[in-house]
Image: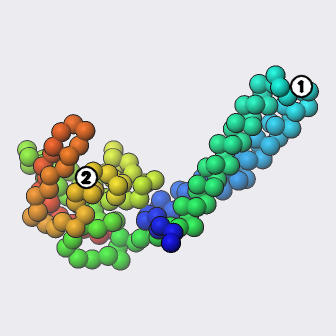
Amino acid sequence: MTEKVPMLMDGYRVLEQELKQLKSVERPSVVQAIEEARAHGDLSENAEYHAAKERQGHIEGRIMELESKLSRAEVIDPTALKGDKIVFGATVTLADEDDAEVIYQIVGADEGDVKAGRISYQSPIARALIGRKVGDEVEVRTPGGERYYEVVEVAFK
């Protein structure tokens, strides 16, 4: 059984765009670079050829990874969700020990951007939050030590 990869529509579109860019621009340009380097003769000491082949390997690997993620994608629309429990796609308002509020949306692994308030569902904070509801106190073990939060609001937007 293949494991589904949860993501929001925006994240799906970003991966699609990257795949399109790799296939239509990056792959043809590296093939051309390999052909040009090959034309220079002796491949055993041809640094341009080896660099281009290495780049080609990275591009092909990333294309395979993206195709796999997109084929297994489970696109979730947070606006279609409801309830009082924190789930993937939820936007959660938390209060820390000093009553400072922070807002996070729980997103897919490739969509995380803490500065933008989006945390991966695989992150320690998201794992501690999933299944909780307003009023719950949550203890999160982070690399910087334990942090405590209270769930103030759960929204689906």
For label 1, the SS is loop
Question: Badge 1 local density, few (<14 within 10 Å), some, or many (20+)?
Answer: few
Question: Is 96 on the left or on the right of 90, as rendered?
Answer: left
Residue depicted at x 46% and y 53%: 110
Specify the amino acid type for callout 2: Ile
Specify the amino acid type for callout 1: Asp
Q: Which residue is disc 2 drawn over?
A: 125
For label 2, the SS is helix
**Closer mark to the observer between disc 2 and disc 1:** 1
Q: Nearer the viewer, residue 125 or 105?
A: 125
Q: Is residue 134 above or below residue 143?
A: below
Q: Which residue is disc 1 drawn over?
A: 42
Question: Is 78 on the left or on the right of 86, as rendered?
Answer: right
Name which quarter of the figure residue 37 lies in. top right
Question: Is 100 on the left or on the right of 91, as rendered?
Answer: left
Q: Is residue 41 above or below residue 18?
A: above
**Residue 83, position as x, y percentages in the image:** 23, 76
User: Number of labelled discs?
Assistant: 2
Question: Is 49 on the left or on the right of 97, as rendered?
Answer: right
Q: Nearer the viewer, residue 127 or 120?
A: 127
Residue depicted at x 32% and y 76%: 81
Residue depicted at x 91% and y 31%: 39
**Residue 143, position as x, y percentages in the image:** 25, 38
Q: Nearer the viewer, residue 86 or 44?
A: 44
Q: Is residue 53 above or below residue 122?
A: above
Give the Cα distance between marks 2 and 1: 54 Å
